[in-house]
Image (cartoon, rainbow, N blue to C red):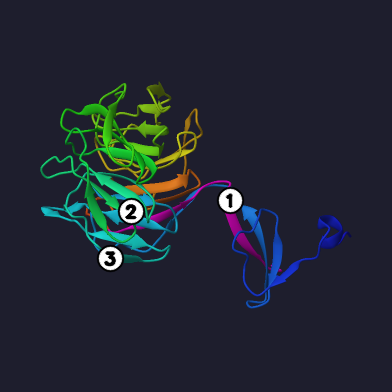
Amino acid sequence: MATYKEIKGTQIEVLASDPSNPVEGQVWYNSTSNVLKGQAATAVGAWATGGALNTARTNISGAGTIPAFVAFGGQSGATVYAQTELYNGSSWTEVNDLNTGRYALGGNGTQTSALAFGGTPPATAATELWNGTNWTEVNDLNAARAYVDGAGADNTSALAIGGDPAPSGQTELWNGTNWTEVNDLTTARAQMGAAGIATAALAFGGYPITGKTESWNGSNWTEVNDLNTGRSDPGGAGTNTAALAFGGYNGTARVAVTETWNGTNWTEEADLSTARNGLAGDGDTNTSALAVGGEGPPVTAATEEWTGAGAGLTRTFTDS
């Protein structure tokens, strides 16, 4: 029988701790835990329970990835929150508040470079910039609106998409200093999910209840294939060619349905553990995302972490 070295051309590494960025097929012996481990790819996507928010909220917004996420704003009944919390992959820590408490606001960016805009009550155009420590008021949206969604890589570049009142198809582009109105959505709506960056975004679902999906190329919106489950208020993550839609309200009930987008079609995947709408979500791709807060009912502090098919997974080998 061929040895591992004969097959791979190298011996199995002996390491005191697991490598920080193992590649698929890599095998090593952890001398601290005395186990043999290897890196594989997940076969199917799944949600796992993460640490709960300190304050349960719905109509919350957020930005970032696993394990570095920032959640801000939201409501629970008549209580409106300015609270901001940071996630480290296992627990949340409360940090400095928004200057203006609000819910149903848009957000995008990273844990250290985020943007918050719009929201209610009442419908506002207020925009705030997060630098990892503090929120700073900057130039307002051109149109005050709530239930607006956003896309963007950081706080220097963003899209504000749709919203109420109306609902609206209005789209605005943030250049780090000012908002500029650009071409509208093909279908006006509020309470959408979104993914991507300012030059390549995806908007899906929304109110009135719909499964419509539109792709943004930096200049125009183009209608593409619909979600399998039409809904308002879903969470969204990823890019305009590899997105994730999860949760929402289908007109009758909150749903846990999760769908992945491959640039052409949506495919149903594993459900959230907690059916809900009004949740925050973000992530770089459709293989790694976070679902935060929302309402089932009741209003929840639940956090779930998504690992999609094809994502890296460390496995421990046993003799059984």
* Residue segment shown in magenta: 301-320
Frontmost of labels 1 and 3 is 3
**Residue 166 location, x and y as percent?**
16, 28
Of 120 and 182, which appears nearest the observer? 182
Amino acid carrying label 2: it is Val
**Residue 60 location, x and y as percent?**
25, 50
| Residue denoted by label 3 | 94
Question: For residue 226: magenta?
Answer: no
| Residue denoted by label 1 | 42
Question: Rounded to the nearest whole Å, what is the CA distance between mark 1 and mark 2?
Answer: 23 Å
Amino acid carrying label 3: it is Glu
Of 18 and 35, which appears nearest the observer? 18
Amino acid carrying label 1: it is Thr
Report whether residue 130 is seen.
Answer: yes
> In screen coordinates, is 275 left or right of 79?
right
The quadrant in which residue 82 appears is bottom left
Rendered-image quadrant of the C terminus: bottom right
Label disc, if present, on residue 151 of the rendered structure: none
Question: Rounded to the nearest whole Å, what is the CA distance between mark 2 and mark 3?
Answer: 15 Å
**Residue 120 location, x and y as percent?**
15, 44
Q: Residue at x 19, y 48 (%)?
A: 103
Classed neighbour count for the residue bearing mark 3: other residues with Cα under 10 Å, few (<14), some (14–19), many (≥20): some
> In screen coordinates, is 58 left or right of 226?
left
**Residue 137 location, x and y as percent?**
21, 49
As drawn, which residue projects farthest toward the right?
Answer: 1
Rendered-image quadrant of the N terminus: bottom right
Nearest to N terminus: mark 2 or mark 3: 3
| Residue denoted by label 2 | 292
Of 1 and 102, which appears nearest the observer? 102
